[in-house]
Amino acid sequence: MTQTMDLFDVSGRVACITGASSGIGRRAAMTLAAAGAKIVGVARREAELDSLCDEIGSSAARVIADVTDRAGLEQLVKDVSAPFGPPDILLHAAGINPRQDADDVTIDAWDQTLHLNVTAPFFLSQAFVPSMKAKGWGRIVTFASLQSTRAFPGGIAYGTSKGAITQLTRAMAEAWSRYGITSNAIGPGFFPTELTATVFDDESRAARNAAQTCVGRNGRLEDIDGPVLFLCSKASAFVTGQVLMVDGGFTAK
C-alpha cells in the first residue's frame, strides 16, 4: 500500500511554471520545489526570476520569455527543456486582467487577455504532450477564477478568458488523459497578488469579499499549497477535467 505522504512526493519530476516571478506562480514554484521537483520558472522579469532561483537553489532554473510570443514558442520549448529535460508538470499561472468596462474594451486588450490567459497555456501544453506521452505521465494545471462562472464589473475580457479555461481544462482532459496526462484547473478566490492589488488596496471592498466567503476571510498564498501539490502529484491520478475552487466557499453562497 502506498504511503500517504508518497502520494504527494514529486521528487524527480520537472515542473515548468509560467508567471513564476510573483504571486501564485511564485508560490507554486516554491511549493513544488519543497516537495522535490526541479523547477523551471518562466516570466518576463529577470530580477524576480533570479530571486526565485536563488531562494530555491540548484534545482531551479529560469527562462526569460513572453509566453504570448507565438513566433518564439519553438525556442521557448527548447529553453524550458534545456536545464532538466522536458517537464512532467506544467502549471500555467501567467495571466492578465485589464479591468475595462464592456463599453471601453479595446481590441488590443481583448487580444492580449485571450492570448495570455487561454491561447498560450494550450499551445505550450500541446508542445510538451509528446514527451509526456512517452513517459506515460503528465500534469497540466491551469487557473480558472470566480469569473469563470460569475460576471464582475470591468471583467468582460478576463471573465471570458476564464470561462474558456474551464472548457479548455475539460477538452485537454478528454484528449490526453488516456495517456496518463491529467488536466485540471484551480479557481482561486480573492488572494493578494499583483492582479488583485486594486481590490486589496480598497479595504472596504476586501472586507466585503471576505464576508462573502464561508470561512470569513480572503485567501492567503499558503492556501494554494495543498491544491497545487495535489493536482501535480500522483495523489490526483484519477482526477482530470476538473476545476477545484479554492475560494473559502465564496461560490457556495
Image (cartoon, rainbow, N blue to C red):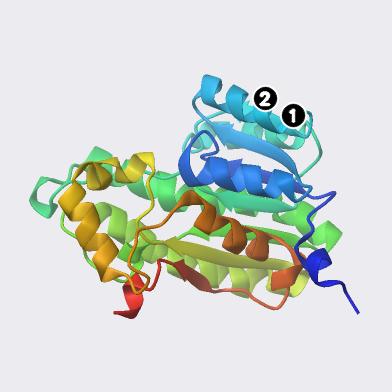
Q: Please tell me whether residue 167 is drawn above or below residue 121 in the rendered image.
A: below
**In what quadrant of the picture does the N terminus appear?**
bottom right
Residue at 77% from the left image edge and 31% from the top image edge: 82
The front one of 248 and 16 is 248
Asked if one can make out residue 92 in the rendered structure from this viewpoint, the answer is yes
Q: Is residue 100 left or right of residue 186?
A: left
Q: Position of residue 199 (x, y in %)?
A: 24, 48
Q: Please tell me whether residue 38 is drawn above or below residue 251 in the rendered image.
A: above
Which image quadrant is residue 29 in?
top right
Residue at the farthest front position:
216
Amino acid carrying mark 1 in the image: Gly
Rendered image: mark on residue 57? 1
Amino acid carrying mark 2 in the image: Asp
Residue at 61% from the left image edge and 71% from the top image edge: 173
Task: Tell me whether the residue at label 2 lies in contact with that at label 1, contact meaning CB atoms closer than 8 angstroms.
Answer: yes
Residue at 13% from the left image edge and 54% from the top image edge: 102
Asked if one can make out residue 77 in the rendered structure from this viewpoint, the answer is no
**In what quadrant of the picture does the C terminus appear?**
bottom left
Rendered image: mark on residue 54? 2
Q: Position of residue 31 (x, y in %)?
A: 65, 48
Q: Secondary structure at mark 1?
A: loop
Residue at the farthest left position:
103
Residue at 30% from the left image edge and 60% from the top image edge: 160
Q: Secondary structure at mark 2?
A: helix
Q: Is residue 203 left or right of residue 117?
A: left
